[in-house]
Image (cartoon, rainbow, N blue to C red):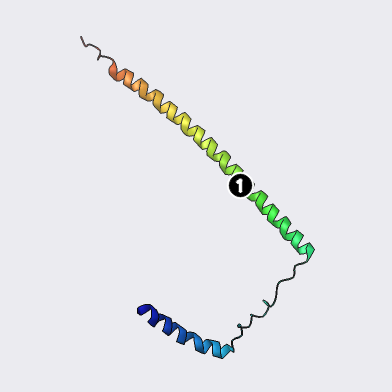
Amino acid sequence: MRYWLLAGVLGFMTVPVAWATGGNPPPQPVGKQGPVQVSAEQARQRVAQHQAEVLRLEQDVARQESDSRQASERLQQQDQAIADLQKQLDALRAKPPASQH
């Protein structure tokens, strides 16, 4: 029931708009009329710009991946150093205390 009521209200709201425009689509804004004609030279320039942008982005990704690998290697080295120090600490704790005279 509510669906039909809502559909009716929306229908009544759109009828005046259709009458006002005479059923024709609304005019397009100035400067937006028809398909945009692009010359072959403009198209080549755009392609070249996009290719340059893609190249720059690929270089950025490669640099970030390299930085990430280096950071990962540093973390692995630090983890290994921590593990070595932990082993040394465990070995020191396992030794019986030195007897005092």
Q: Disc 1 designates what residue?
A: 60
Q: How many labels does the image show?
A: 1
Front residue of 26 and 86: 26
Q: Which of 22 and 39 is in front in this view?
A: 22
Q: In this view, does 85 lie above or below 22?
A: above
Quadrant containing the C terminus is top left
Q: What residue type is labelled 1?
A: Asp
**Residue under the image location 70 percent in, 53 percent down:** 51
The answer to whether 25 appears left or right of 95 in the picture is right
In the drawing, does residue 25 fall left or right of residue 36? left
Residue 68 to residue 38: above or below: above
Q: Which residue lies furthest to the left in this view?
A: 101
Q: Nearer the viewer, residue 7 or 38?
A: 7
Residue drawn where x is 60% and y is 42% of the image: 63
**Residue 50 sits in which quadrant?**
bottom right
Residue 90 screen position, x and y as percent: 32, 21
Identify the image quadrant of the N terminus: bottom left
